[in-house]
Amino acid sequence: MSENTKEENIEKQENTEPTSEESVQDLKNDEKKEIPKDQTPEEKLQISEDKLLRSLAEIENQRRRFEKEVKDAFEFGSFNFAKESLAILDNLQRAKEAIKNDEKLKKNQDLDSFLENITIIEKDLISIFEKNRIKKIEVENKKFDPNIHQAMSEIEDEKVEPGNVLQEIQAGYMLGERLLRPALVSVSKKKITKDQENAVKKEEK
């Protein structure tokens, strides 16, 4: 081997930097490479340091990948569970309203006590949701936001600016910063005059 070839090999080894894309197999292959006997102790130390740095980089990459996989699995699982759990609260609230409006049950002396127990369960469930970062989306006196609201109908209202939420049809919820379920709402719109209505009809024809 010529002196020039030796110098080129040493230069390549010294310029080798650890990267996050080095595989474990590459590291093993590097370890199998025979170190020339005529290398100085400093050169051998440099090669060993390079291998160590690459190994540490690979270990760090594996740790990050593992943490991301665990986080994604946890968030995906908790999101689905939280979304399914909303049905429990929905059904409980529907049952409460149905019982309150039942004419036969209204005559029952124990109705108020029964409704109070349902309310306690409802509050406990909401409290559990909030502890797990599940919060209701506020809609009262709010401007319609397509990111968290879903318009189910439009209502003419001269007293309210167009595009404001007038009524909540179904509650929406957030899981942390992520939308769990949009709030179904009715939105205000500008009242159409007779002239505007006739103009629209003419355009349709």
Image: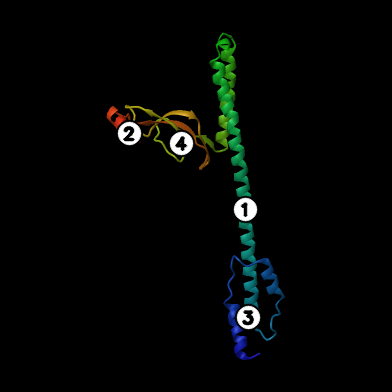
Could you tell me residue 63's position as x and y percent?
63, 57
User: Relative to 160, is 176 above or below?
Assistant: below
* Residue drawn at 57 percent across, 77 percent down: 15
Q: Which residue is mark 4?
A: 149
Q: What SS does tag 1 mark? A: helix
Instruction: Give the CA separation, mark 2 to mark 4.
Output: 28 Å
Which numbered disc, 4 or 3, marks the residue closer to the eye?
Answer: 4
Look at the picture and state if 112 lies above or below 142. Answer: above
Question: Which residue is label 1 attached to?
Answer: 67
The nearer-to-camera label among 2 and 4 is 2
Q: Residue at x 58, y 10 (%)?
A: 104
Which residue carries the number 2 mark? 200
**Extreme residue in the bottom direction:** 2
Few, some or many residues within 10 Å of mark 1 (<14, 14–19, 20+): few
Residue contact between numbered discs 1 and 4, judged by CB atoms under 8 Å: no
Q: Earlier in the sequence, mark 1 or mark 4?
A: 1
Instruction: Kindly identify the residue that appears in the image at 54 percent across and 16 percent down.
Output: 100
Earlier residue among tags 1 and 3: 3
